[in-house]
Image (spheres, rainbow, N blue to C red):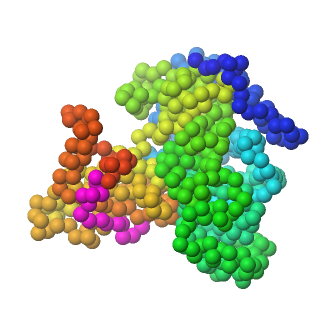
């Protein structure tokens, strides 16, 4: 059961300041977290009342009821596959109120995948205001822990991604691209706590090189004003550092001469940079000295000496980047401020300057109606994809239990009802009566470098497709496993293959194995391929061929650590260092994808 508000004193103290905006935001957080269950009850009633005329709710004969009991007893728990047909109807032009009484304004493309496609999440204009509300709470919370953030600027590497249109003409794009291109962002009022070094013209440039170059150039020019450095994901910030490693000489030249790299051709950027870029040989010499040295340790604090913290997500798959971030920053605090997805913006980290392993998010009960499916990795109930026949009992937000894990189930204003988001969360505590959750992982995700997510079935399919190239050589893949290698920037997928060659005289050539790498990449989903081709956030896939008997050694090692010989299965992804070291000690040859896979904004498969 939830801890009562009077038994859980709030760690957020109202600031001893005259800043009414900050104080009002903190009071709002305190009020809705003290009344979590009451707010949730109101939110559900609002959603059901608003969407009562919809085709979806009418199917379950709610008869305009807005109470929890009726809702839970009649509306099923669903996955994306259950809704896909109706979503496609909207994409094809059906304007009737299928999920939501308000008209669908666009589709948000989820980074989660469904049979190799981006998921399309219908959304409404009113949701942008809800997202903006959560953004407005971030800095009031941060101000409790870090002072003076209104005295400088933020160097945040922000980018838009490719968008497409559905057959009906509705735009389909990632949620952050939607936000950055919105009127709420472009016409945002001045906020001294949210002044960016990056001009909007650079953020909104669709060319990733021109956008990154301009944002880095502005960050260098304003280096003494920078108080926080970041990107949405840890991988994005490390990609920016790698970009600086590759382009510092040209950036220094631009700063020294006051002229802009001729590769920057976007008219909006060139016009804006004419106002910003002035000759500064002294700054250019400083950049040359710092970037041409033997080590890049602490490069962030050396170039941006007033940086107080890094603003990046380092939970979930991003935790693998923490050691590298610490190396480049000299151990600056890592602030994970918000928990959000395409389906909904969920909540905040109310203790943002904490150890990354302690990051917990407080779900704001006003953002949607939230239920929780008890999660047990050994339970078939928690892993089922749909539960229409015998829905498992779901737990309300205010009733989750400390220490237990759950899968998040959302009912939102845009019309998703009892939708399995796919995130596994663990309850770590309570803020007033609102539970705090640690993000454990995405369900069924095997590999991830950036916003890509590859599951076991998809990896299996990719291996099978690549194996076809080996058949004419009488060679097959005996066993395989994988891991996400983030030591290089950008990171990349590594696949270990043990091969069975029936005729060693016709062993697969290097050229054939490189083609296998590319075939695997062609088999992976569009989010992965966009990361490779457009965003350059993922490096070429690598196959490491290991000696015969390697996977038997892997099994022997697992059994020596207590695994049952009868239940042992080859792990399809490995992260434990002794296992990767064992595999690497048996590598016979290494092969990389020789080209980029096919991808275009229009091609979703």
* Position of 55 relative to 546 (above/below): above
> Residue 432's x, y, as percent?
68, 25
Q: How many marks?
A: 0
Which residue sits at x=24%, y=39%?
Answer: 560
Q: Is residue 165 shown to the viewer in this render? A: no
Q: Is residue 579 left or right of residue 328?
A: left
> Residue 320's x, y, as percent?
48, 50
Q: Is residue 252 left or right of residue 439?
A: right
Q: Quadrant of the C terminus?
A: bottom left
In which image quadrant can residue 269 be found? bottom right
Which residue sits at x=63%, y=27%?
Answer: 430
Q: Quadrant of the N terminus?
A: top right
Between 347 and 416, the residue placed more toward the observer is 347
* Position of 491 relative to 442 (above/below): below
Which residues are the magenta region?
Answer: 582-596
* Position of 316 relative to 527 (above/below): above
Q: Is residue 502 shown to the viewer in this render? A: yes
In which image quadrant can residue 196 be found? bottom right
Q: Is residue 535 magenta?
A: no
Which residue is at the far right? 18
> Residue 375's x, y, as percent?
45, 28
> Residue 392's x, y, as percent?
45, 22
């Amino acid at each position: 059961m939830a801890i009562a508000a009077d038994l859980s004193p709030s760690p957020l103290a109202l600031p001893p300041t005259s800043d009414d905006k900050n104080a009002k935001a903190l009071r709002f957080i305190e009020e809705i977290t003290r009344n979590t269950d009451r707010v949730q009850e109101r939110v559900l009633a609002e959603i059901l009342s608003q969407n009562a005329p919809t085709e979806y709710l009418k199917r379950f004969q709610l008869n305009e009821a807005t109470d929890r009991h009726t809702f839970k007893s009649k509306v099923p728990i669903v996955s994306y596959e259950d809704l896909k047909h109706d979503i496609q109807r909207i994409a094809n032009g059906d304007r009737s109120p299928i999920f939501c009484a308000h008209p669908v304004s666009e589709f948000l493309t989820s980074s989660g995948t469904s049979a190799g496609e981006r998921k399309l999440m219908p959304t409404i204009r009113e949701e942008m205001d809800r997202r903006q509300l959560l953004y407005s709470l971030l800095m009031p919370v941060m101000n409790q822990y870090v002072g003076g953030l209104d005295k400088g600027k933020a160097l945040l590497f922000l980018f838009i991604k490719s968008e497409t249109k559905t057959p009906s003409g509705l735009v389909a794009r990632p949620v952050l691209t939607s936000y950055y291109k919105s009127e709420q962002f472009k016409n945002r009022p001045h906020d001294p706590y949210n002044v960016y070094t990056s001009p909007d013209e650079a953020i909104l440039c669709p060319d990733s090189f021109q956008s990154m170059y301009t944002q880095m150039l502005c960050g260098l020019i304003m280096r003494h004003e920078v108080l926080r450095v970041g990107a949405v994901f840890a991988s994005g910030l490390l990609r920016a550092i790698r970009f600086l490693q590759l382009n510092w000489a040209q950036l220094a030249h631009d700063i020294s001469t006051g002229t802009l790299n001729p590769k920057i051709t976007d008219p909006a950027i060139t016009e804006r940079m004419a106002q910003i870029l002035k000759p500064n040989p002294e700054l250019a010499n400083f950049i040359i000295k710092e970037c041409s040295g033997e080590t890049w340790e602490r490069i962030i604090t050396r170039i941006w000496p007033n940086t107080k913290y890094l603003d990046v997500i380092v939970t979930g798959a991003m935790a693998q980047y923490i050691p590298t971030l610490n190396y480049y920053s000299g151990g600056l605090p890592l602030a994970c401020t918000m928990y959000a997805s395409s389906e909904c913006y969920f909540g905040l980290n109310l203790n943002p300057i904490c150890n990354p392993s302690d990051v917990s998010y407080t779900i704001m009960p006003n953002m949607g109606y939230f239920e929780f499916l008890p999660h047990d990795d050994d339970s078939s109930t928690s892993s089922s994809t749909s539960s229409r026949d015998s829905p498992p009992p779901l737990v309300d937000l205010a009733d989750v239990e400390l220490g237990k894990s759950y899968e998040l189930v959302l009912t939102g204003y845009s019309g998703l009802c009892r939708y399995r988001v796919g995130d596994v969360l663990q309850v770590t505590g309570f803020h007033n009566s609102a539970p705090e959750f640690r993000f454990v992982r995405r369900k069924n995700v095997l590999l991830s470098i950036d916003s890509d997510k590859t599951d076991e079935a998809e990896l299996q399919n990719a291996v099978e497709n690549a194996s076809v190239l080996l058949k004419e050589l009488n060679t097959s893949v005996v066993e395989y496993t994988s891991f996400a290698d983030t030591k290089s920037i950008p990171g990349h997928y590594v696949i270990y293959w043990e091969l069975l060659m029936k005729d060693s005289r016709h062993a697969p050539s290097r050229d054939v194995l490189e083609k296998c790498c590319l075939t695997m990449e062609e088999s992976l989903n569009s989010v992965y391929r966009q990361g490779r081709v457009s965003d350059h956030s993922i490096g070429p896939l690598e196959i490491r061929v290991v000696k015969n008997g390697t996977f038997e050694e892997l099994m022997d090692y697992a059994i020596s650590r207590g695994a049952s010989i009868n239940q042992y299965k080859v792990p399809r992804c490995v992260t434990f260092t002794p296992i990767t070291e064992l595999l690497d000690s048996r590598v016979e040859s290494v092969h990389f994808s020789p080209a980029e896979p096919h991808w275009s904004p229009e091609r979703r498969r």
